[in-house]
Each structure stands twice: as C-alpha cells, then as structure tokens.
Image (cartoon, rainbow, N blue to C red):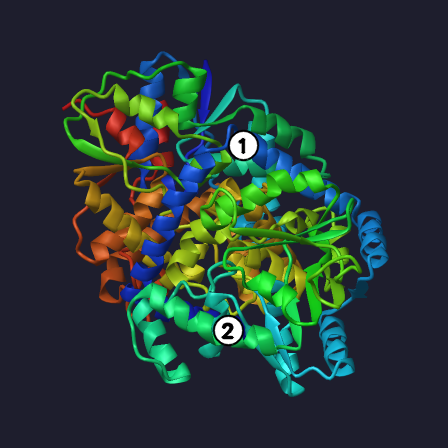
C-alpha cells in the first residue's frame, strides 16, 4: 500500500524523529511511504482561533495535494481531527467541498491506521518500563481513539501500563495555551501531578503537542517526568 | 482587550494559583463524578437515553411557539395569569407590578438561574422590595452578597467553617461546624419568612404543553413551601423549557437528577397547573407564570446555534470542565459559567462583551460527552470564535495568521523560517521566561521546546534519495 505521511508543522520542526520512526515502521511492514515536501501545516491554529479564511488559505493546498492519495496518515490526533472532522465543515459550500470530503474519508491517525486499517498490533518492540498513557483530547473525543494505542502498547515486551486516575486534558489547546497561559499551565500542573501519582517511568501519548506542553510545565518546575511519543516507543528494542 | 476579558484574565490567574480553592473544588467534583457514574450505570442504555432526551428537547424547540400556545391556553383555563416577557427588563417589570398591585413587601424565592439571568433581585431591591433566597446554597450566597458559584451548587466553593462564620456574623448564631446544625439554622430563619412572605417565587425545569403544567425539581422542599404558603405565586421560566408531553418527564426528570446531582430522582418533583381551585384545600390564591424570551426565540431560528436551547441546566458540562475546575465559577463573571455559559453568554447577550469566554477553552470535548441532551459544545465554541473573529478581528492577530499562511504555503519560507528560529533559540536562554521574552506567554510557566537543525523534511529528503 502507498501511505502518505503528513508530519504536522511543529513535529517537522521540533520532533522530526517521531515522523521518521513512523516512516521506518511503515517501510518495515512492506509499505511504500510518501511525504509531501510542499506542505507544512493543516491550518488548525488559524481555524481554532476563528480565522477561517486564513485557515482555508493553508488547508486548500493540503486538500488539492492529498485528496487523491490512497491513505493519508498523521502522527497526531489533533491534526487528524482537523482534516477528518473539520475540513468538511471548513470547505462546506466552497468549490473544494467534494475534495475535502474525499480527503477526510481516507485520513487516519497513526495508531488507528495501524490497528484498524492494517490490523497490526505487534511491531516486535520491547521496552521494559512502567508507562502511563495520555489520551490527546482531539484523538479521544473527536475521533474516538482509545483502544488502538493501548492495543499497540499491550504487545510491547516488558511494558506495564498504569492508567491515570482520570482522563483529563493537559491544558495545551493550541492558541489557548498562549492566550490564557495561567489557566493552561494550571491544567498542565494537574496533569503532571496525575502522571507522577501513577509512579510510571514514562508518560506516552499519540500527540506530541500534549507531551510538549506538560513536559514544558514539568521542566520549568523541575519535576521529573519523562515523556515519549507512542511511535518512538514502538521502534525501541531494549 | 475589553474590560471583561481583562478582568477574566486577572481573576483566572489569581484563582488558578490558589491551591486551597483548587482542592475544595476538585474534591467536590470528584465525589460528584463517582456518584454520577454509579447513577448513569443504573440506566439500561445511557447513550440511547441521551439520544431520546435530545430528540424530545429538539422536538420542543422545533414546535416551540405552538407548544407555548397550548401551554398558555391550558394554564389560563385553570385561572393562571400567563405573560410573555420579550426581555429581562420586561420580566422584572411584570414581577414588580404583581408585587405593587398586591401591596406586597417580601418575596420568598426558590432557586432560579433564570431570575439570576435577568437580575431580578437587584431590580426588586432597587424598588424597596425584599427578595429572600430559600434554597440553602442560594441563601448562603445571598448572605455573602455574591452571585451563585455554580448553577446547581451555588455555594460549593465554601467550607462548613466559612458558612459557620457567615451565620455567626450575619445571623448572630453560635458557631458550629456540624453541617446538619448549620442547615437547621438556615431552616429556622427561613420558616419564619415563608409564613410572613407576601409572594412566593419559583423557577422551573420544564413546562408540559400537553397538560399545561410547570415542572419544578428540588431537594429541599423550599420550592413547595414558597409555592404553597404565600397567597400569591409567581413562576419564571425560559420559553425553551417547553416539552410536548407529560410522558417526556419520565425520561427527563431522572436524567436531570442523574447528571445534575448524582441522584436517581430528585427528592421533590412538583407539577403546578394553576391557583387553588374551588374544590382544593391548599395552594396560592393567584398564580402567575412569566414566559421569558430574552433572545431565545432569535436563537431558536439560528440553524447553527439552536441546539444550545436544548440545555436543561443540569450543570454536567460545568462539572467535567477542566477550565472550570481551575478557575472556578466566579471568574467567568457570567450568569452561566463553564462550557454552557461560554457558548450561551455571547449568543444570548453580547458577543463583544463575552467573546473571550469562547476562547477560554482547550476544546477538549469532555462537556459534549457528558451532556444529557447531546449539545456539541466545543463545535459551537468554534463557531462563536469564528463569529467573533469575523465581526471584529484583532488587527495583529489577523496579521499574524496571514503571515503564518504565507510561511506555511511557501516551502522556502518555511525552510528558512525554521533555520532562523534555530539560530534565534541559541540566544533565547538569556531572556527565556522574562518580560522581554517574545514567547513569554509560553515561557513564563513552561520550558520552550527546541527546534531541530534538521527538520523532518530534511531527514525525509535524505531518506528518500
């Protein structure tokens, strides 16, 4: 199968290894990977802040370029939700409506794609550690992704999953984190406390943006938590 | 930034930093959540119940005017005076007129968020009347001269010790830390008021068109006393509360109790249809029902936002909101706090005054998952944001997003943007987190993530060669 991988803007710039590891995983499963070089962002920052014209300006390029690919995979629940759930809304009544709908239909979040579409759960990884899993809200509640990453973790040798006491947002929320820093950081603090309470060695997530947020809070307060993206964990052989 | 938005930022920052407050609210909400989940589990199929409840309320909205006509006809037939108030000021005037015409001085009230919405107490006090809140939580916040902290639990932010101090200061009673004794103090004070009050006032949870009845849910019996002891009774109800059939309550009342207060059913559920009839031995001599519009019929015609009128004011969205959990009920400075308020306040009242609330949300969606009538709150918040940014965009923000689209759309700009960022960040530690840091809104409380010299696009280029 030909898989198109779209590494979101912040991942391209700050977490390139996560996306490269996704490439390696797909290739090791015998698939062909493509990564469009001319695309940088899905348009979510502008969309979530209410600037839909500016969002369409960025998103239309994504629609035109990717509407006919076989499968589009994003290593982020949030950006997947943008394309899968919100593009049809954003392009409703425009000339790109049909293409946006077509694109939405074959757009997948990484763990969902592996488990649901490819039927793969065991990637042969081993990671002898106690981990806890943070569900990115967009992946969880816009896309309904909950069991998929856990199915992947369950096959990792030596790994023990400890769930947190409550499912709760990490406080990132895109531009919200900059517009309301006190609320956002306070939420991040609660999340760090929840992670630490599990006693896990690592906190894993399928969204780099969430990890970036509460790792940033923890580092600032010199609280020791180690975060790792699900994809990075799945290529570990320890 | 308008004054309201500025005040919200300041209040939110202050309250977020208050760990005692966070602990009080967190403990209360966790205890509620455990109880609620147990009650939800008693439903055979909670998801199906939500679907049905949403349908019933939607049906009420789709047919609202016709149902209101039927309701009015039936109520009037039993001798009830029914009024339609286009605005909050109109509703206040109607209440004042009833008080004036009857030479009344005091009005004992049971809980009504709709009366908070129209600022009825202030309107009454300004004219020299005395409204007395009889719901325990409302009684407490009225003594403190502050608005309710939560639409269902008005005094949830207070500890028993604070309430004891309050009663000692305002009512002159002996301090006690026993919640039951505190309740008895309130009860003793209120009993006297019920007997002496000229008018009793209630809010309402539903109106049943089919039978012409007003449904009131409560746990303390204060609403029944407000309705039966004074000679005159007034009910204020939003027009969106009308449902078609009596049977609808068999679903809506248990659902309201479940998510509203973690109960199977509330202690007292009463249906009022009119004043005392000739063959009845109790009830008020006069019954007045005020149907409040205050922007609702306008919203009902809005194809995007009409679903917000399905809301049954259970507060379950507030109880799961991580923002509310951190900033608490008063920071919003709005009648309806939390997710429901952040959608409703800009829509029902003024977009410019309240638009900041629509942005004060991480869009986590927990509220939508818990809403018993399936209102898509996060999506409506996004629509509010769009409306806010279209009608009155912030100049620099719009400019920034225009620049960003240029940066994202031109591969060369994006490539060199990242490179320049990488160079810039070498010097960032010198100012990181300080007031001159351009990224201070992030770095004051969080470490900044690092840009990599080789981006994914660089790695990919090398890999795919």
Q: Position of residue B396 (x, y in %)?
A: 53, 65
Of the pair B24 and B287, the residue shown nearer to us: B287
Secondary structure of the residue carrying numbered label 2: helix
N-terminal of the pair, mark 2 or mark 1, is: 1
Neighbour tally class for label 1: few under 14, some 14-19, many 20 plus, Cα within 10 Å = some
Snapshot quadrant of residue A17: top left
Please give the name of the residue rendered at 75% of the width and 43% of the height, measured from the top-left corner: B244
Residue at 35% over, 44% down: A210
Q: Which residue is mark 1?
A: B47
**Image-based side of A145 in relation to B339, left or right:** left
Q: Quick check: marks 2 and 1 in contact, CB under 8 Å?
A: no
Chain of the residue displaying label 2: B
Label 1: state its secondary structure.
helix
Please indicate, yes or no, whether residue B270 appears anywhere in the rendered image.
yes
Indicate the quadrant containing the C terminus of chain B: top left, top right, bottom left or bottom right: top left
Residue on which disc 2 sits: B190
Q: Position of residue B406 (x, y in %)?
A: 53, 50
Q: Is residue A38 visible?
A: no
- Work out whether residue B394 or residue B1 is closer to the camera in this orientation and state it: B1
* Foreground residue among B455 and B231: B231
């Amino acid at each position: 199968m030909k898989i198109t991988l779209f590494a979101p803007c912040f991942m391209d710039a700050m977490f390139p290894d996560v996306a490269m590891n996704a490439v390696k995983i797909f290739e090791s499963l015998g698939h062909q990977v493509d990564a469009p070089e001319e695309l940088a962002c899905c348009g979510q920052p502008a969309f979530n802040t209410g600037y839909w014209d500016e969002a369409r300006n960025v998103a239309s390029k994504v629609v035109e370029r990717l509407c006919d690919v076989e499968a589009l995979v994003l290593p982020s629940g949030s950006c997947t939700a943008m394309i899968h759930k919100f593009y049809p809304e954003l392009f409703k009544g425009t000339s790109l409506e049909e293409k946006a709908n077509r694109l939405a239909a074959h757009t997948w979040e990484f763990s969902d794609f592996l488990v649901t579409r490819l039927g793969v759960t065991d990637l042969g990884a081993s990671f002898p550690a106690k981990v806890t899993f943070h569900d990115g809200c967009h992946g969880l509640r816009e896309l309904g992704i909950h069991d998929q990453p856990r199915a992947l973790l369950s096959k990792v040798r030596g790994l023990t999953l400890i769930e947190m006491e409550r499912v709760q947002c990490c406080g990132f929320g895109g531009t919200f984190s900059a517009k309301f820093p006190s609320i956002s950081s306070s939420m991040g603090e609660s999340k760090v406390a929840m992670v630490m309470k599990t006693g896990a060695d690592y906190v894993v997530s399928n969204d780099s943006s969430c990890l970036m947020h509460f790792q940033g809070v923890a580092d600032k307060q010199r609280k020791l938590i180690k975060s790792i993206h699900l994809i990075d964990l799945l290529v570990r052989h320890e | 930034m308008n004054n309201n938005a500025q005040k919200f930022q300041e209040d939110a920052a202050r309250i977020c930093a208050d760990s005692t407050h966070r602990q009080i609210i967190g403990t209360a909400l966790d205890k509620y959540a455990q109880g609620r989940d147990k009650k939800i589990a008693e439903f055979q199929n909670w998801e199906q119940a939500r679907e049905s409840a949403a349908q019933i309320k939607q049906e009420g909205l789709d047919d609202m005017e016709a149902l209101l006509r039927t309701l009015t006809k039936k109520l009037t037939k039993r001798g009830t005076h029914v009024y339609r108030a286009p605005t909050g000021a109109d509703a206040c005037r109607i209440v004042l007129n009833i008080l004036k015409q009857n030479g009344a001085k005091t009005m004992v009230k049971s809980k009504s968020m709709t009366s908070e919405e129209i600022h009825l107490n202030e309107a009454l006090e300004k004219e020299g009347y005395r409204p007395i809140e009889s719901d325990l939580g409302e009684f407490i916040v009225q003594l403190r001269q502050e608005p309710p902290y939560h639409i269902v639990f008005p005094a949830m932010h207070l500890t028993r010790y604070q309430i004891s101090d309050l009663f000692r200061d305002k009512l002159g009673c002996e301090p006690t830390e026993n919640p039951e004794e505190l309740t008895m103090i309130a009860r003793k004070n209120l009993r006297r008021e019920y007997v002496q009050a000229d008018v009793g006032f209630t809010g309402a949870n539903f109106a049943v068109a089919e039978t012409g009845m007003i449904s009131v849910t409560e746990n303390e019996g204060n609403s029944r006393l407000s309705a039966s002891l004074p000679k005159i009774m007034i009910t204020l109800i939003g027009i969106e509360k009308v449902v078609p059939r009596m049977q609808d309550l068999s679903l809506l009342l248990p659902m309201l109790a479940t998510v509203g207060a973690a109960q199977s059913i509330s202690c007292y559920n009463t249906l009022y249809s009119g004043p005392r009839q000739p063959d009845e031995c109790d009830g008020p001599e006069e019954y007045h029902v005020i149907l409040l519009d205050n922007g609702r019929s306008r919203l009902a015609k809005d194809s995007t936002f009409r679903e917000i009128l399905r809301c049954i004011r259970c507060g379950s969205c507030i109880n799961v909101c991580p923002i509310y959990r951190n900033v608490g009920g008063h920071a919003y400075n709005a009648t309806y706090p939390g997710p429901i308020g952040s959608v409703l306040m800009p829509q029902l009242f003024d977009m410019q005054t309240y638009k900041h609330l629509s942005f004060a949300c991480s869009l986590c969606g927990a509220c939508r998952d818990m809403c018993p009538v399936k209102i898509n709150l996060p999506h409506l918040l996004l629509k509010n944001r769009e409306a806010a940014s279209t009608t009155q965009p912030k100049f620099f923000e719009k400019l920034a997003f225009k620049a960003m689209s240029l940066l994202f759309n031109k591969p060369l700009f994006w490539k060199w943007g990242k490179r320049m960022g990488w160079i810039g960040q070498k010097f960032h530690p010198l100012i990181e987190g300080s007031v001159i840091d351009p990224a201070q809104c992030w770095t004051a409380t969080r470490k900044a993530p690092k840009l990599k010299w080789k981006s994914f696009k660089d790695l990919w280029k090398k890999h795919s060669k």
